[in-house]
Image: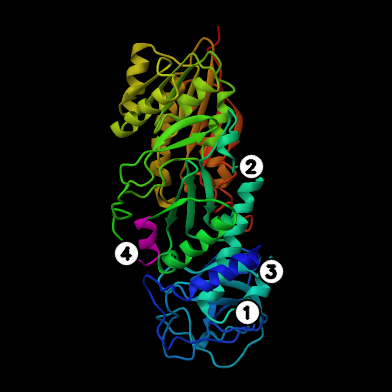
Amino acid sequence: IMLTIWLTTLSKSHSLSRTMGKRPSHAPLFMSTTTGYSFPRVIVKRNRQSMSFREGNPLIFTRAIAYTESQTHESSLPLASLVQVDVLLDKTNHNRKHQQKDYPHYQRSQNAQTQSIGWGVFNPSSMYRVRMLCHSVNMRENLRDKLKWAETEEEALSCILTTQLESAFQVRKALGLFHDKSNASSLYTDTFRLINGEGDGLSGLAADVIGGDVLVVMSSAAWCQVHKDLIICCLKQVLDYNNLDYDIMWKTTPARLSQDGMEVSDEGTTTHEKEDTRVLATELGIQYVTFPYASGQKTGYYCDQRENRWNLAHYCKDARVLDLCCYHGGFALSAVIRGQAAHATGVDSSQQAIDACNMNANLNDCGDKVKFVRDDISKFMKEAETQGDSFNVIILDPPKLAPSVSGLDRAKRKYHGLNRDALKLIDTKLGGLLMTCTCSAAMTQQNGGQYFLNMVQQAAIAAGRHITLLKVSGAAPCHSQSPASFPAGNYLTAAIFYVAPFSR
């Protein structure tokens, strides 16, 4: 299967050119000791710090690199070069006295004994000097065989891309995410993540299937921009082989690309001719209106909460539900349609989000059981407390409040206040459930997740409520992760707490 895909891609790859960052004609090529074809080498130091890279971590940092092999006087290899990554066998053979102060790499003419780690793409301007695309330890034999026949860097990269993309497809197939619309069940789903960065061996690249018709590709690394045409070509070949016909939409995340040394428009993408085209996304039988072609940095739908919405619905029968930061109304609609909740109220500060929620409610014929309000959630909760309103189930799913570790203290105070006010609205006579979420990786990963749970406990004390932790979960399994880099890719926490009633 992979050989057929590769041969088809190979015939097209000769006509492709990079959209930016082309390799200079004098860029060095070196003979690989394992594949029989030539390309530059990046040599990693052998020490305790670099052990994770040798064991499969896909991101290699600057300080882990001993040197790069080059025959020119350049300080660094060109952007997005496909490189072979080796590790020194002798941990003392770093030749540090030859390193230049201004650059973390230097040229080396003599050969040191090394061991192959794998292959990746190089970036001289990023803290992630190499993003690994495949490792020697778990490299598939069919990929080894195909690389032996590659004559250029582009052909070699197409071999790697088609292998990783096909693997990503097989993972989602194993999860049962590809369905025939003609045989759709009541829990039919046609919207999910097909590619999830490091989790699928393609660091910096993500892609969501929306409505079974559109594939929104999200680029957040410079190498993806440089090799955009080749990525799309390989993606089309894999989809075609698997009898899938998706309309591909390419988007970018300017902030992350800037961190990777590449500046792009703040719009994230140019205006598409289908800007206002609606696409219906179905999740577990519930339909949502999306606009995947609209300009912006998102793929059009948050499918990472799919199983959390499904799990919470089981506890919502006859309940009064409050969905805070409701976005497209996913939790509220799931509670009413799947969980048979008595009523659900959704709150969001965006009028565009509220409009989408109302469209989704009408689309699913449940407008009489849901109400969506445009308001600041803090203001809404304080007014609800003043009026004596209460709920049996509350979902608190705010946007990212801690973009980095440096903002944790400030974010914690904000999370604390929101959770305190939400806990106050849980029915004091009957008690109830609170699902509280964070999509901030810094918050999720701090102290193995205990940092976030401790914050909720402190908020409960401030609210005068007793809580019991029932369940902690993360993103839906289509948001795959690399076990070698876990928990670095773990960003979402969804924790369900039982909130006890006041003592009688």
Who's the residue at 61% across and 48% down the image? 172
Comparing labels 4 and 3, the label whose residue is closer to the camera:
3
Q: Does dot 2 land on a helix, a strand or a loop?
A: loop
Q: Does dot 1 land on a helix, a strand or a loop?
A: helix
Query: Looking at the figure, which quarter contains the C terminus?
Result: top right
Residue extending furthest toward the front: 182
Report the magenta residues as a range.
Answer: 252-263
Question: What distance separates the C-alpha of mark 4 from that of mark 3?
Answer: 37 Å
Residue 262 among those drawn in magenta: yes
In the drawing, does residue 297 fall left or right of residue 84? left
The quadrant in which residue 354 appears is top left
User: In the image, which disc is placed on residue 142?
Assistant: 3
Question: What distance separates the C-alpha of mark 3 from that of mark 2?
Answer: 25 Å
Q: 342 and 2: which one is in front?
A: 2
Picture coordinates of residue 384 (x, y %)?
36, 17
- Counting residues from the start of the chain, the first of labels 3 and 2 encountered is 3
Which residue, given by chain and number where applicable, does mark 4 sit on? 263
Which residue, given by chain and number where applicable, does mark 1 sit on? 149
The crowd level at tag 3 (other Cα within 10 Å; few <14, some 14-19, many 20+) is: few
Comparing labels 2 and 4, the label whose residue is closer to the camera:
2
Q: Does dot 3 land on a helix, a strand or a loop?
A: helix
In the drawing, does residue 377 fall left or right of residue 304? left
- Labels 3 & 2 near each other (Cβ < 8 A): no
Q: Does dot 4 land on a helix, a strand or a loop?
A: loop
